[in-house]
Image (cartoon, helix red, strand yellow):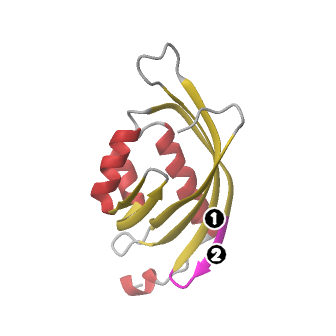
Amino acid sequence: MSNSATLTTPITEAEVRQLATQWYRKLDVHAPLVELLPMVHVDAEMKFPEATLRGLADFEAWYERVIRIFFDEVHTVRDVQVEPQGESVRVKVVVRWEASVWTPPAAYSQRIKLDAYQTWTVRRDEVTDRPVITEYIVDELVFDDDSARL
């Protein structure tokens, strides 16, 4: 099969679920960037409450900063809804996120507990043919009543 034929192979829901599960597992353990970068398209746009990132260099800088802020992270994928859109898919993700944060000179860390509602666009990478995130938008954060705030 030629490379051009494989690029039009539809992305399956199972591939998207696997991508989401692996993505959050790697975020939990603060995996090396070399493990996360193949999951992000070179021209990806990512919109977080605190920043809009464009491309891998922005993502790298953001990731290196947040792994120094948050610890004891646990991401639990609650829902993944996949909607095909030609050669890409639109994905609605709901993820439970808990993390600790410590702000010096506080005596104790604080726990963040929330559900994050996100919209992703995923397509096949032109080189590897693997699903990659091309757009990642945090639509809403719903904090638990007893959660620390960002």
**Amino acid found under the numbered disc labelled 2:** Glu
Callout 1 secondary element: strand
- Tell me how many marks there are: 2
**Amino acid found under the numbered disc labelled 1:** Lys
Which residue is situated farthest in the top direction here? 107
Q: Is residue 104 above or below residue 50?
A: above
Q: Taking 106 as reference, is 68 left or right?
A: left
How many C-alpha atoms fall within 10 Å of the one at disc 2: few (<14), some, or many (≥20)? few
The answer to which image quadrant residue 103 occupies is top left
User: Residue visible at 42% across and 33% down?
Assistant: 69
How many C-alpha atoms fall within 10 Å of the one at disc 1: few (<14), some, or many (≥20)? some
Q: Position of residue 47 (x, y in %)?
A: 46, 60
The circle on residue 92 is 1
Q: Nearer the viewer, residue 33 or 145?
A: 145
Q: Which residues are magenta?
A: 81-87
For the question of whether residue 11 can be seen, the reply is: no
Which residue is situated farthest in the left direction here? 57
Verify CB contact (< 8 Å) between mark 1 and mark 2.
yes
Q: Nearer the viewer, residue 134 or 144?
A: 144
Residue placed under numbered mark 2 in the picture: 83
Callout 2 secondary element: strand
> Is residue 137 part of the magenta span, yes or no?
no
The circle on residue 29 is none
Q: Is residue 16 above or below residue 51?
A: below
